[in-house]
Amino acid sequence: PIYLGVHVFGVIPFCVMPEVRLLRRHLLGAVLIVVLSSVLWVALPVRVDRPPIDPEAIGFGTWLLRGVYSFDPTTNCFPSAHCAIAVYAAIGLRFSSRGLFVWGIITAALVCLSTVLTHQHYVADVASGALLAALCGYGTARRTRRARRSSRDRPRTARGRPGRSCRRCWCRTRRERTSGPGSSPRWWPATRR
C-alpha cells in the first residue's frame, strides 16, 4: 500500500501551499521531474528482474503485489519516478507545518524503501530519483528566492531608480538615512527634545 500511496502523497503539497506563486513553482518542479525521468528512461533503458510470486500465497499484500506487477512494467527504472515524486512532495511540504513536513520526510523514506522491497527498482534507481527531486527542489527554491527580490524590492537611489544601498548601514539611500525627525541617521537613536 505504501508503494501505491505515492500517487496520493504527491498531491498533498498542492493542497497546503500557502501562496499561488509557490504552487506554480512546485508544479513546475513536478513537471520537470516527469519530463527528465522520461528522457532518462529513453536514453538509459534499465530493466529490473523481479522474482516470481508464489502462486499458492494468499493475502491482501500478495494480491496487491500481483496487481502492481501486472500493470507496472519492468522497464523505466532509472530514475525511480515514484521516489522522485515522493521526495519532491516531502520537499514541498516544507512550506506547511513542521509536523506535516516531518510526516512527509518519513513517508518519502518509506516509499523509497518500499520500491526496493517490492523489487520495482534497484537502490541506484532510488538514489537517482531522490537526487533528481532534490535538484528540482533546489532549482525551484532558488527561482523562488530570486523572484522575491524583484525590481520594486531593490534599494533605490536618490533619483528613485533601482540601485545600491548605502554600505554603512541597512538603509536604502542616503536620503532615507538622513530623513526624519531631527535628521538623525537611522542607526543612531533619535534625539529627544
Image (spheres, rainbow, N blue to C red):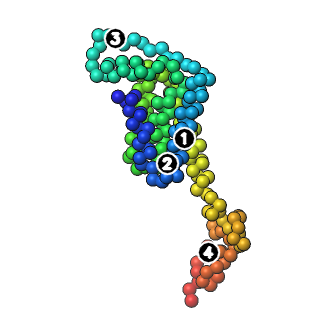
- Nearer the camera: disc 4 or disc 2: 2
Helix, strand or loop at mark 4: loop
Helix, strand or loop at mark 2: helix
Q: Distance between the residues labelled 1 and 2?
A: 10 Å
Q: Within 10 Å of the Cα at label 3, are there few (<14), some (14-19), or many (20+) other Cα atoms?
A: few
Upstream in sequence: badge 1 or badge 2: 2
Q: Position of residue 119 (x, y in %)?
A: 44, 19
**Residue found at the very far bottom of the displayed protein:** 193
Q: How far apart are marks 1 and 3 (CA)?
A: 40 Å
**Disc 4 residue type (three-letter):** Arg
Total marks in image: 4
- Nearer the camera: disc 1 or disc 4: 1
Q: Distance between the residues labelled 4 and 2?
A: 38 Å
Which label number is shown at residue 165?
none
Helix, strand or loop at mark 1: helix
Q: Distance between the residues labelled 3 and 2?
A: 44 Å
**Disc 3 residue type (three-letter):** Asp
Helix, strand or loop at mark 3: loop
Does the rendering let one see residue 148? yes
Q: Position of residue 131 (x, y in %)?
A: 55, 33
Query: Mark 3 sits on what residue?
Result: 54
Query: Mark 2 sits on what residue?
Result: 23
Q: Is residue 105 left or right of residue 36?
A: left
**Disc 1 residue type (three-letter):** Gly
Q: Is residue 124 left or right of residue 153?
A: left
Which label number is shown at residue 186?
4
Upstream in sequence: badge 4 or badge 2: 2
